[in-house]
Image (cartoon, rainbow, N blue to C red):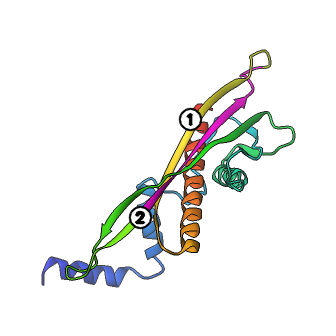
């Protein structure tokens, strides 16, 4: 018998469907993956206020959507309490720009014998100003503040059907909000 066949027999005899999930989790944890909802850690407890993001664009729903995405990203962080009343730190966000570009035209071929079709794409970009503020190390130190700018963009295809275009634009904006929330969370915990 060859080695591959012998190894297969060994695994069939010793492994069962009950032990397979434990082995997979062990392998994944060795790769740095975790079952925790967040990988962020704080050195000391922090109470954070996250007011609804200001938004002056024509996409009025993006302020609450970004706020929900950021809170969801930060929730479950050990040592962090998100509370609007009596918070010693704040995370204020302002959506400063939402741009929907015209994108580009691409030639799409399905088969060599068919006439090529034209496909258009658009790019959506969102820019957010974020201000992190937390108290100083002791009561006489001034508050620590950091202001940063984040941006994210996503390209989507445009079709002849208007409803489909609106749906793809909404999906692109949702993806951008999740991406911005991830960027904000990572930088916030690097700073604090």
Does residue 116 sit above or below 30 in this rendering? below
Residue 30: % across, % down: 42, 56
Start-end of magenta stretch = 121-138
Residue 125: % across, % down: 53, 49
The verdict on residue 128 being magenta is yes
Does residue 47 sit above or below 136 in this rendering? below
Q: Which mark is residue 163?
A: none
Does residue 171 sit above or below 143 in this rendering? below
Q: Which mark is residue 120?
A: 2
Q: Residue 168 versus residue 187: which sits nearer the camera?
A: 168
Check the picture and name the quadrant holding the C terminus: top right
Residue 147: % across, % down: 63, 29
What residue is disc 1 on? 190
Give the residue displayed 76% in from the left and 45% down from the top.
81
CA distance for labels 2 and 1: 39 Å
**Helix, strand or loop for disc 2:** strand
**Helix, strand or loop for disc 1:** helix
Does residue 43 sit above or below 71 in this rendering? above
Give the residue displayed 54% in from the left and 67% down from the top.
168
Check the picture and name the quadrant holding the N terminus: bottom left
Q: Which residue is at the far left?
A: 1
Q: Residue 96 versus residue 38: which sits nearer the camera?
A: 96
Q: Residue 117 versus residue 146: which sits nearer the camera?
A: 117
Q: How many marks?
A: 2
- Magenta stretch: helix, strand or loop mostly: strand
For label 2, the crowd category at 10 Å Cα-Cα, with few meaning under 14, some 14 to 19 and many 20 or more, is some
Sequence-wise first label, 2 or 1: 2
Q: Which residue is at the far right?
A: 85
Q: Residue 59 versus residue 40: which sits nearer the camera?
A: 59
Q: For residue 117, which quarter of the picture? A: bottom left
In the displayed structure image, the side of residue 72 where residue 119 appears, left or right? left
């Amino acid at each position: 018998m060859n080695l591959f066949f012998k190894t297969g027999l060994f695994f069939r005899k010793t492994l069962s469907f009950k032990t397979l999930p434990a082995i997979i989790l062990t392998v994944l944890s060795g790769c740095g993956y975790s079952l925790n909802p967040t990988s962020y850690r704080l050195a000391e407890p922090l109470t954070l206020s996250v007011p609804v993001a200001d938004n002056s664009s024509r996409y009025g729903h993006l302020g609450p959507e970004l706020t929900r995405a950021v809170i969801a990203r930060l929730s479950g962080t050990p040592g962090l309490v998100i509370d609007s009343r009596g918070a010693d730190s704040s995370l204020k966000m302002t959506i400063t720009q939402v741009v929907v570009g015209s994108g580009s035209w691409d030639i799409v071929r399905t088969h060599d014998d068919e006439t090529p079709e034209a496909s258009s794409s658009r790019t959506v970009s969102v820019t957010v100003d974020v201000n992190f503020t937390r108290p100083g190390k002791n009561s006489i130190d001034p508050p620590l503040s950091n202001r940063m700018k984040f941006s994210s963009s996503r390209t989507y295809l445009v079709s002849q059907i208007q409803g489909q275009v609106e749906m793809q634009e909404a999906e692109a904006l949702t993806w951008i909000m999740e991406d911005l929330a991830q960027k904000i969370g990572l930088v916030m915990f690097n700073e604090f």
